[in-house]
Amino acid sequence: MSVADTYGSALAVPAYMKLTGPFIRSNIEQGIHTISIYEFDDDRADEAMAYLNARYARFDAIEGVTTSVEEWLGVGLALKLLDETQSVTDVLDLVNFRF
């Protein structure tokens, strides 16, 4: 199955999740890269991770295609935590990335 076919038949994004992208970047040396941003409430993190694993497992089956899921902290929350703690080190201690 091709990337286009897999993308076209990917699992629908759940209602509790907002998808921005995908965005595509390409160059001769590094190939094609895409990034998609999924937003969801923290209390749905386990459910969201199960969805993302299922969605992207199908892409991993395509030769030459790799996927990864990373958790990022929004700037609003980062600034709020920094304001509360007044310490970058303390903020890093508070943030516990699950994936």
Image: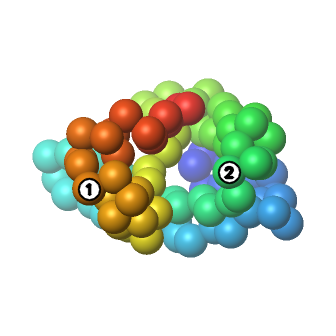
Work out whether residue 51 can be spotted. Answer: no
Which class describes the residues within 10 Å of circle 2: few (<14), some (14-19), or many (20+)? few
x 80%, y 41%: residue: 47
Q: Which quadrant of the figure has residue 19?
A: bottom right
Residue 80 x/y as whole percent? 42, 65
Residues 29 and 49: in front is 49
Residue depicted at 24% across the width and 39% down the height? 89
Q: Residue at x 35, y 45 (%)?
A: 91
Where is residue 14 shown, x and y percent of the image?
83, 59
Amino acid beneath label 1: Gln
Q: Secondary structure at mark 2?
A: helix
Residue depicted at x 14% and y 46%? 29
Q: Which mark is residue 86?
A: 1
Residue farthest to the left, as pictured: 29
Task: Say left or right for 3 vs 45.
Answer: left
Say which element carries label 1.
loop
The residue lying toward the viewer, choosing from 24 and 39, is 39
The numbered disc on residue 42 is: 2
Q: Is residue 76 above or below residue 29?
A: below
Whichever of labels 2 and 1 marks the residue nearer the N terminus, that label is 2
Is 5 situated left or right of 80 in this image?
A: right
Task: Using the rendered view, name the quadrant where residue 26 is placed.
Answer: bottom left
Report the mark closest to the observer, 2 or 1: 1
- Percent position (x, y) of residue 23? 44, 68
Q: Quick check: 71 left or right of 91?
A: right
Which percent across, then down, holds residue 9?
78, 54
Q: Nearer the viewer, residue 6 or 80?
A: 80
